[in-house]
Image: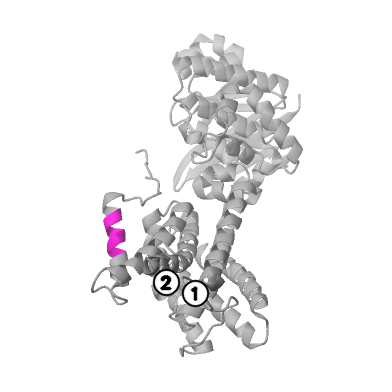
Amino acid sequence: MTTLLNVKDLRAYYGQVQALHGLSFSLSEGSLTTLLGANGAGKTTTLRAICNMVRSTGGIEFDGKPLNNKSTESIVRFGIAHVPQGRGTFTTMTVEENLQLGAITRKDNAGIVSDIERMYAHFPVLKQRHTQQAGTLSGGEQQMLAVARALMLRPRLMLLDEPSFGLAPLVVRDLFGILGKINREDKVSILVVEQNAQLALELADQAYVIETGRIVMSGNAKDIANNEEIRKSYLGY
Amino acid sequence: MELFTNQVLAGIATGAIYACMALAVVMIYQAIDHLNFAQGEMAMFSTFISWQLMQWGVPYWGAFIIALALSFVGGIAIERILFKPLAKAPVLTNVAGFIALYAIINSSAGLIWDFTIKQYPTPFGSSPFLGSQLISTHQAGMIGVTVLLLIGLYFFFQYTRIGLAMRAAASVPESARLVGINTSWMIALGWGMASAIGAIAGMLIAPVVFLEPNMMGGVLIYGFAAAVLGGLTSPFGAVVGGFLVGIFENLAGTYIPGVGNELKLPIALALIISVLVVKPAGLFGRHIVKRV
């Protein structure tokens, strides 16, 4: 499989504070990869560095092209959709407008219209609420909306930051089921950052474990899930 | 009764101008979270440009359109040159920037066109509108142009991609960038549009208040009042606030004994303070709730 995203010796800074200390990993085309780690390990920072939302050094290559020094809004045009922590919902706008915004860089109007219908098929609850203000949706519905908004880009790579955060266990199962389906059927590569390691490892094919800004473990998701030592020392379950 | 109707209609006509100014202020407030104290001076300068063009023989509507286009470009230029570098600066730095802009534009206009009061033409004439004594054709024109402008803006923001992108950039800038919107240019575009809307207000009110560098001082205060009354977070509220302030100002001047022309402004502002005591976010504004 070809490498879609290649991150090399990534260092990121918040002001004077260094949050990532030379982190390297890669993601193959079509895979569902997860970044695991405790609070403050640098998972969110890694995603933010890929989209140039924090100051960073090191190499980030997407499909062989360097992403460094590209602005956040132009990185979207490479086909990278980022669902940020807290979902980033446009709360004062309608559900349908949120979906249209996901496709704001696309020019094919007919395709956008049919993709909105496709999202409604994926997430029927969004269709029921398409004229409602997005801020009035429940947490789980907003997460569905955030994923749908990201898919409206027709991305090659989707970055998901803690999609399970604040959701009821049943809703999380639902959501992860949909993510797996999107990965398999729509051929969207997914990089998902999670604290809920157990669930993420069930879903993913590839996993990396981060601790204080460094990769400490990597490998096949099944192997990591089955390795009791890793589970106990890094994942806490 | 005729006096009442007359005063209400006159209030709607000036209220239309306040609505435009309030809308311009709200557009910039939504984009950068600051009140543009120089909005009135920018509008005054645009009006002078149209006047100058007419002095050079350009017909009214030609001068109107050229002044609009120049105001749009000028608004973008002001944002790029002065306020983009201040984007991350503290509030007071920005306030100083606005005051500087106010003084610079005001003095430049005085320097170029001097401070004597000038007549400004109206394309609508000033005869009674449709033979009625209630309202003049110019007042009807003010209302008409404003209503057209508001309808146009509504369609722009509701049904065009760029309007959608501008709204998104103003409401959640970070998410807007993550879907690929260049928020920095959306802010500049907002400045351009606010500047052009202000120019329309200036050119419509100039025949009434006459043209001179301080012509927009009072108008802008009413515009601010309207924006605060309707809610600084709501363009719709700003427009409603503009009309309400216009009507209230006229009725208070006519019916409250002792108010007359001199006390109209304080009375209008007292009304606004009363509203804000009861509804701090304005009539249509949203309370901004921040998680801590």
Using the image, tell me which numbered label, if any, was put on residue B55: none
Q: Secondary structure at mark 1?
A: helix
* Left or right of B95 on screen, residue B181: right
* Alpha-carbon span between mark 2 and mark 1: 9 Å
Q: Quadrant of the C terminus of chain A?
A: top left
Magenta stretch in the rendered image: B269-275
Q: How many marks?
A: 2
Which residue lies at the image location 54% right of the left edge and 37% below the top edge? A94
Q: Nearer the viewer, residue B117 or B291?
A: B117
Residue farthest toward the left in the current orientation of the protein: B258
- Of circles 2 and 1, the one toward us is 1
Using the image, tell me which numbered label, if any, was put on residue B219: 2
Crowding at mark 2 (Cα within 10 Å: few <14, some 14-19, many 20+):
many
Mark 2–mark 1 CB contact (< 8 Å)? yes
Q: Classify A219 as above or below B28.
A: above
Earlier-in-chain disc, 2 versus 1: 1
The dominant secondary structure in magenta is helix
Residue B200 in picture, x, y percent from top left: 55, 69
As shown in the figure, which amino acid type bears the numbered disc 1?
Ile
Give the chain of mark 1. Answer: B
**B245 falls in the magenta region:** no
Residue A113 in picture, x, y percent from top left: 71, 35
Crowding at mark 1 (Cα within 10 Å: few <14, some 14-19, many 20+):
many
Which residue lies at the image location 58% right of the left edge and 80% below the top edge? B49
Which residue lies at the image location 47% right of the left edge and 75% below the top edge? B41
**Res. B147 in view:** yes
Residue A60 in picture, x, y percent from top left: 65, 39
> Which residue is under mark 1?
B205
Q: Nearer the viewer, residue A156 or B114?
A: B114
Residue A216 in picture, x, y percent from top left: 53, 25
Q: Quadrant of the N terminus of chain A?
A: top right
Q: Secondary structure at mark 2?
A: helix
